[in-house]
Structure formats: structure tokens, C-alpha cells
């Protein structure tokens, strides 16, 4: 019973941890096409707002998709 309470407390603490990520203004390159994107902003609720460097309209994706499909290429 004691271990169950300890694990429950750890899970509750981990759920409350928030990490701020500042990736606005960075450029990433798509791994499959080598096409660069410009990250406009990142919000935990909304995800990443970005645009391809040769397009003017904005798109959205999750942070996990960015990490899996793109590689960091510097700041814009």
C-alpha cells in the first residue's frame, strides 16, 4: 500500500511539470523532401504554427510531428 501511494504521488507531480520550449523563429528542414519551414510560434495547447519558406500561409502540427519529421537547421 505504501508503494502504491508513492507511485501515485510521483505520477501527480510529473503531470504538473510544464516545460517551456522557445522554438519561435527557428528553421527546420523536412527529412523526406529537404524543404525548409519557418516556425512562427509554439503553444502547448495549439501546437506549432509554421509556414514553408516559399509559401505565405500558416499551417499547424504537433511537437512530436516536428521532432519525428524535421531536423533543426538554425534560427531565421
Image (tube, rainbow, N blue to C red):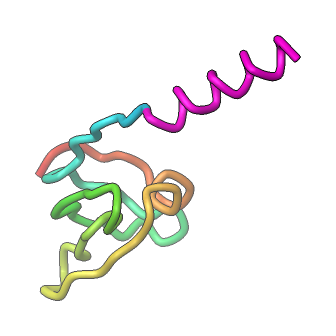
Is residue 44 magenta-colored? Answer: no
Q: Position of residue 53 (x, y in %)?
A: 19, 73
- Identify which residue is drawn at 11% across, 52% down: 76
Instruction: Please report the residue visible at 42 percent of the width from the left and 65 percent of the height from the top.
Output: 34
Left or right, 21 with reference to 67: left
Residue 19 locus on image (x, y percent): 35, 34
Up-down relation of residue 69 to residue 10 (above or below): below
- At which x and y percent is residue 43? 26, 58
Hey, which residue is sitting farthest right in the picture?
Answer: 1
Residue 4 vs 11, above or below: the answer is above
Main SS, magenta residues: helix
* Residue 42 relative to residue 64: left or right: left
Is 9 covered by the magenta stretch?
A: yes
Quarter of the figure that contains the N terminus: top right
Of 12 and 20, which appears nearest the observer? 12
Location of residue 45 by image quarter? bottom left
Q: Residue furthest front?
A: 1
Looking at the image, residue 38 sits to the left or right of residue 34; the answer is: left
Q: Residue at x 25, y 70 (%)?
A: 50
With respect to residue 22, does 47 lie above or below? Answer: below
Q: Position of residue 3 (x, y in %)?
A: 83, 14
Q: Residue at x 45, y 58 (%)?
A: 66
Give the extent of the magenta segment: 1-16
Name the image quarter holding residue 20: top left
Amino acid at each position: 500500500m505504501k508503494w502504491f501511494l508513492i507511485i501515485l504521488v510521483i505520477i501527480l507531480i510529473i503531470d504538473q511539470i510544464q516545460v517551456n520550449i522557445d522554438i519561435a523563429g527557428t528553421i527546420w528542414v523536412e527529412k523526406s523532401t529537404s524543404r525548409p519551414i519557418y516556425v512562427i510560434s509554439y503553444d502547448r495547447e495549439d501546437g506549432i504554427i509554421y509556414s514553408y519558406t516559399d509559401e505565405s500561409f500558416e499551417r499547424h502540427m504537433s511537437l512530436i510531428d516536428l521532432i519525428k519529421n524535421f531536423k533543426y537547421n538554425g534560427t531565421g
